[in-house]
Image (spheres, rainbow, N blue to C red):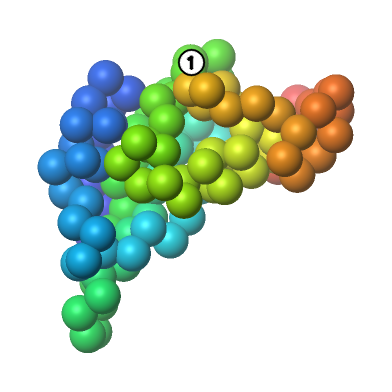
Amino acid sequence: MNKIETTLENVKKDIARFYKYNLHHFIVMNAVEAGDKIEVQWFFNEYAFPGETICIYAMIKPDEEVPSIKDIIASAWVAEAELADLMNIKIENTSKGFVLEPDFEGAPLRKKK
């Protein structure tokens, strides 16, 4: 797997420069707690055999807003909505209530303090 670091300021530009719809499949978006920060990850796989997996990631503070990539990859809204619900991450133009009830308090996949 090839892992590429970016920042919140550059993530949209970096993904737009990298992603080619005919070469890459957007697999999923993930988030992992890393101490007092969260590593937000966007996973892609190459269509060509054997197909390398590429992870573009950014380290964020829990209260920072992550830019949406829906304008680059239309199907990304599903992964963004899941993370908004399950990790309680703020994602640009994404509302809670896709996986969980909109008024659900908490984040089921976040570590308990």
**Residue at horizontal 40%, vertical 25%?**
67
Pick the quarter of the image with the N terminus. bottom left
Q: Residues within 10 Å of mark 1 (few under 14, many from 20)?
A: few
Percent position (x, y) of residue 97?
A: 76, 33
The residue where tag 1 is placed is 64
Q: Is residue 64 above or below residue 39?
A: above
Nearest the camera: 67 or 62?
A: 67
Q: Quadrant of residue 12?
A: top left
Q: Is residue 45 above or below residue 49?
A: above
| Mark 1 residue type | Glu
Percent position (x, y) of residue 82?
A: 64, 43
Kindly tell me whether residue 73 is visible in this rendering: yes
Percent position (x, y) of residue 20?
A: 19, 56
Nearest the camera: 34 or 62?
A: 62
Pick the quarter of the image with the C terminus. top right
Q: Is residue 105 above or below residue 25?
A: above
Farthest residue in the top direction? 63
Percent position (x, y) of residue 18?
A: 17, 48
Kindly tell me whether residue 37 is visible in this rendering: no
Nearest the camera: 72 or 33?
A: 72
In the shown orientation, is residue 13 left or right of residue 60? left
**Residue at horizontal 21%, vertical 66%?**
22
- What is the secondary structure assignment of the residue under circle 1? loop
Farthest residue in the left direction? 17
